[in-house]
Image (spheres, rainbow, N blue to C red):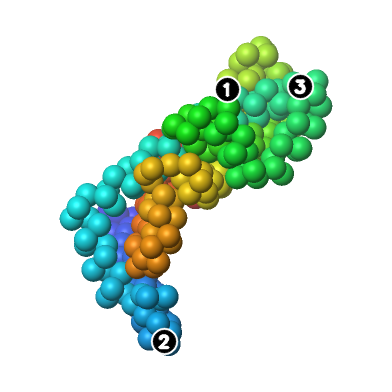
Amino acid sequence: MNARREGAPQHARASRRRRLRYTLNVVIYVISISIFLIAWYLASDFFAIPRLFPSPQRTFLTLLELVEDGSLEGDIAASLARILAGFALGSAIGIALGLLMGSSRLMRYALDPYVNFLRFISGIAWIPLTTMWLGLGESSKIAVVAYVTVFAVAINTLAGFQAIPRIRLRAARSLGATRLQLFFLVEFPSCIDFALRGMRLAMAGAFLTVVAAEMIAAESGLGFLINSSRQFMATDAMFVGILALGALGFLVDKVFLVVGTLTLGKYRLGR
């Protein structure tokens, strides 16, 4: 009974600390965004030609116009579909590649030159070629997004293999684990957190690459919105596209982190 009585106040204090921490985080977010908006307003007011640097009010009105005619939602959906398709494909290839290199020393040395050569070639450099090879449709954009995703995921997955304590592998072998049991019960679970962190890093590259691809060869998407607005000096629409891109990336990253933590939290994602 005494232990239970002592535990209740401690639980209440911990709960209050969590609420206070959450409130403090929200306040910091609000203050940070407010400072950004004020700085934006002052910067736009500094320009002699408002069209060159639209104010927050002008950008917000343009945002409403693009939402009302449905073009912004269509561009966001197009970019998001390309990003998710390429990201999923590249992540699957990257995880498989990292597992293959980690589980076999022969394959690691055979593939290492290609991985460390290709990962330094920007996905943007491949856009002209992929449009010639795959056309101006969705395939070329998905391909370059998958390309930039593969290497970050593969290298992080391989790092997960290399970070496994040798004593853990020896313990599994001493208990009679077969090669398949060692892979599925020790090696693969140890790589999951590393692979997921590589996927988070690769997501940023996917956003960067898809915008460049949409600027060069697309009739929809946030990159297309930004590029087409530039031709008409519609900087307010360009600002909308840029802000939408940042907000979309922020939300996708948070969703990825939350879903990953809820489903694979025991592998330390988000901790």
* Numbered circle sitting on residue 19: none
Number of numbered discs on residues? 3
Q: Is residue 220 left or right of residue 8?
A: right
x and y percentages locating residue 84 in the rendered image: 43, 37
Pointer 1 or 3: first along the chain:
3
Q: 67 and 204: which one is in front? A: 67
Q: Give the crowd class for mark 2: few <14, some 14-19, many >=20 residues within 10 Å.
A: few
Residue extending furthest front? 232
Q: Nearer the viewer, mark 2 or mark 3?
A: 2
Query: Would you say the residues marked 2 and 3 are in contact, meaning their CB atoms lie under 8 Å apart?
Result: no
Q: Give the crowd class for mark 1: few <14, some 14-19, many >=20 residues within 10 Å.
A: few
In this rendering, does residue 92 appear at all?
A: no
> Which residue is at a point 81% across and 27% down the rendered structure image?
109
In this rendering, does residue 112 appear at all?
A: yes
Kindly identify the amino acid type of the residue bearing the numbered disc 1.
Answer: Leu
Query: Would you say the residues marked 2 and 1 are in contact, meaning their CB atoms lie under 8 Å apart?
Result: no
> Which residue is at a point 43% across and 61% down the rendered structure image?
230
For residue 139, above or below residue 155: above
The residue labelled by disc 1 is: 185
Q: In 3D space, how far apart are the residues under numbered discs 2 and 1 (Cα atoms)? A: 65 Å
* Numbered circle sitting on residue 48: 2
Q: Is residue 20 left or right of residue 99?
A: left
x and y percentages locating residue 29 in the rendered image: 37, 70
Pointer 2 or 3: first along the chain:
2
Q: In 3D space, how far apart are the residues under numbered discs 1 and 3 (Cα atoms)? A: 21 Å
The residue labelled by disc 3 is: 107
Q: Nearer the viewer, mark 2 or mark 1?
A: 2
Kindly identify the amino acid type of the residue bearing the numbered disc 3.
Answer: Met
